[in-house]
Image (cartoon, rainbow, N blue to C red):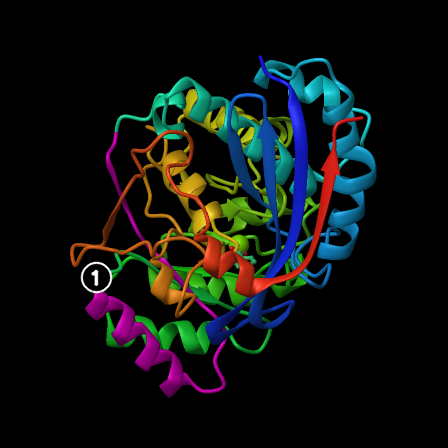
Amino acid sequence: MSVVRNVELRLIGLPLVRPFRTSFGTSTAKECIIVRVETDEAEGWGECVADVEPGYSEEFNEGAWLVIRDHLAPALLRADHVAIDDLDRLLGHVRGNPMAKAALIDAVVDARLRADGVSMAQWLGADRDRVACGVSIGITDTTEALLEQVEGYLAEGYRRIKLKIEPGIDAERVGAVRAAHPDIALSVDANAAYTIEDLDVFRALDAYDLLMIEQPLHHADLVRHAQLQRLVRTDLCLDESIRSAADAVAALELGSCRIVNIKQGRVGGIVEARRVHDVCRAAGVPVWCGGMLETGIGRAQNLALAAMQGFTLPGDTSASARYFLDDLTAPFVMAPDGTMAVPTGTGIGVAPRPDRLAETTLRRESLGKV
Ligand code: OSB
Ligand code: MG
């Protein structure tokens, strides 16, 4: 148990090495909220995975900033003491907003673990010290440009290639990549851009021996996903649809997917992410660690999570260099065999480099004990 003395919010901006285009928009820079929590015992860091626009989910940076500043952080700053097991209760008066909650919860957990001298992977009971890495490739203007990126990432050692698709840029593109690379682990991610009316596209994708089709339909439509899963051979994987362990229970009971993408930031933090993992593992459903183009802070958390037993597929846990020329933390490097080391230091094992944090900070606000 500890006392939360200060919560500092920073909006930071980092240029991306290349634009990232999905079915819901294009990003040229990473802009996110970094939370620093100071307790009487230690400091902790968290990253909010929301973006500038509410395109992936309803959450977005400006909204998340207000929710954390005016509704979530005050609840922790008012409390006499805060333990990890208290977090759900202390923050439960705020509905939804899992990304905002995750940033704060992860920072508190990080501080707790640093004070206890335990790494996040240890705390999660993760036994792996390296994880297998995949890479997510944005929609490109041409098939040639896509093939070039695929070549480059394969040469670096990535163990799974995920292609973003959208209506009109799908089966043919995927077919071209599959023809060039008959044996690679390949998947696609639609970010909810299709409807059940697009069955022809999914039937066409069935021919390319994909590892999975990620989030084909609207996030709230578990029933249609179950219908689609019965109509295609390829495993469906849910990302946007799974915002809690309860969502995972519903999706698995309905048969809406056979694989789950776990993003701690999307489900409300590392504590809930662990519950999603446990639900899937008990059901024998493979999971993998998704990503939201995180800086080194979120990346460290993702690597600890991905080291858990149920994570049997390569994650979107790519190297810092895939996103940034100069990360917020020391760079995360992938070995030529396509694996990355799980941080071993206490808590998430990394912290922002003070100079890099200072030069990327766009706005800052400090909230003291009330
Ligand atoms: O749907 O998995 C997604 C990035 C931003 C928003 C949503 C998604 C993604 C990715 C990139 O696919 C994953 C990563 O490399 O961090
Ligand atoms: Mg996705």
Image-based side of 118 in relation to 25, left or right: left
Viewer-nearest residue: 316 or 247: 316
137 in the magenta segment: yes
- For label 1, the crowd category at 10 Å Cα-Cα, with few meaning under 14, some 14 to 19 and many 20 or more, is some
Q: Can you say whether 180 is above or below 279 in the image?
A: below
Taking the spot 32% from the left edge, 47% from the top edge, the residue there is 314
Secondary element at tag 1: loop
Q: Can you say whether 327 is above or below 90 in the image?
A: below
166 in the magenta segment: no
Taking the spot 64% from the left edge, 17% from the top edge, the residue there is 82
Q: Dividing the image into 4 quarters, which one contains the N terminus?
A: top right
* Image quadrant in which you'd find residue 187: bottom left
Image-based side of 35 in relation to 365, left or right: left
Taking the spot 67% from the left edge, 62% from the top edge, the residue there is 197
The type of residue carrying mark 1 is Gly
Which residues, given as a range, are shown in magenta?
A: 128-156
Q: Can you say whether 92 is above or below 19 in the image?
A: above
Viewer-nearest residue: 128 or 9: 9
Q: In x, y percent, where is residue 245?
A: 59, 27
Q: In x, y percent, where is residue 174?
A: 40, 72
Q: Residue at label 1?
A: 157
Taking the spot 39% from the left edge, 42% from the top edge, the residue there is 350
Image-based side of 48 in relation to 315, left or right: right
Viewer-nearest residue: 226 or 291: 291
